[in-house]
Amino acid sequence: MERSPCSVRLIDRHEIAENTAAIFLSKPPGFIFTPGQHLELIIPHPIETDHGGNKRDFSLCSAPFERELVLAMRLRESAFKRSIACILLGDDLLIESPFGSFRLHADTENPAVFIAGGIGIAPFMSILRQEAHDGFPHTITLFYSNRHPEDAAFLKELQTLSAQERRFTFVPTMTDIKNSRQIWAGEMDRISKDMIAKYIFDFTTPLYYIAGSPAMVAAAEKLLTDMGISLDRIRTEEFAGY
């Protein structure tokens, strides 16, 4: 049975990293989703469209217990992004949801390793916010790769969460720090076997979750399989650029 789109209101919109914005939407009554899922955002009357039309998929950054729905998006020169920028606070949008099976496993005895590239952090924010709300039943290590700290959405929130939660280890890495305006004392290489082994004693035990651009996901999946991780222990989610 086909679902009808739900009407939502644009509540807020602000920058969370360079060329990256968070979009805050009202939450429809009875809206239920699992952390890690995504929705389809529809602009009813866009100022312009391209071959993708007036709708795009976005992972939810907010957790189910929160009062609002939050999406994160890179600000690019596309018809859809230009149309989003023209939507006024209080205006109506439409969503179709939820979709996807990119969700944390139920067995809390089995640790998880998250590998995020750029805006691929979005579904992990939903999962981690729910974990924090639930007392962090899982042991989770997050490797988060960006070019510079300026590009890294939710960086401060993740650093704070890691300092507060003993079952959450946060490993941000910046691959082009020489072009950053900020001082960086953390990891500065691409995610590798050596980096993973540095933070995870037995890297064959966890379940792995990868989210990012198609190229990043493919490279990370190959890295893990080359390390001897079987494909049935790897979950992936690709983010298109649009």
Image (cartoon, rainbow, N blue to C red):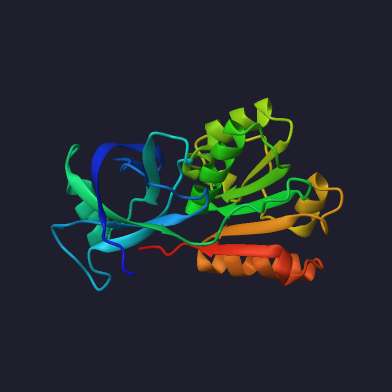
Q: Is residue 104 placed above or below 236 in the rendered structure? A: above
**Pick the front one: 99 or 216:** 99
Horizontal and vertical percent position of residue 73: 38, 50
Q: Residue at x 68, y 55 (%)?
A: 191
Is 140 placed left or right of 182 in the picture?
right
**Pick the front one: 209 or 15:** 209
Q: Is residue 218 placed above or below 82 in the rendered structure? A: below
Horizontal and vertical percent position of residue 18: 40, 42
In the displayed image of the protein, which residue is found farthest to the front? Answer: 1
**Pick the front one: 134 or 52:** 134
In the displayed image of the protein, which residue is found farthest to the top? Answer: 164
Q: Is residue 79 placed above or below 36 in the rendered structure? A: below
In which quarter of the view is residue 178 placed?
top right
In which quarter of the view is residue 203 placed?
bottom right
Horizontal and vertical percent position of residue 2: 31, 68
Q: Residue at x 46, y 44 (%)?
A: 61
Count of labels in the image: 0
Horizontal and vertical percent position of residue 116: 58, 53
In which quarter of the view is residue 236 placed?
bottom right
For the question of whether residue 22 can be seen, the reply is: yes
Q: Is residue 90 placed above or below 98 in the rendered structure? A: above
For the question of whether residue 159 can be seen, the reply is: no
Q: Residue at x 19, y 66 (%)?
A: 49
Quarter of the image that includes the N terminus: bottom left
In the displayed image of the protein, which residue is found farthest to the right? Answer: 201
**Pick the front one: 68 or 145:** 68
Quarter of the image that includes the C terminus: bottom left
Q: Residue at x 73, y 45 (%)?
A: 108
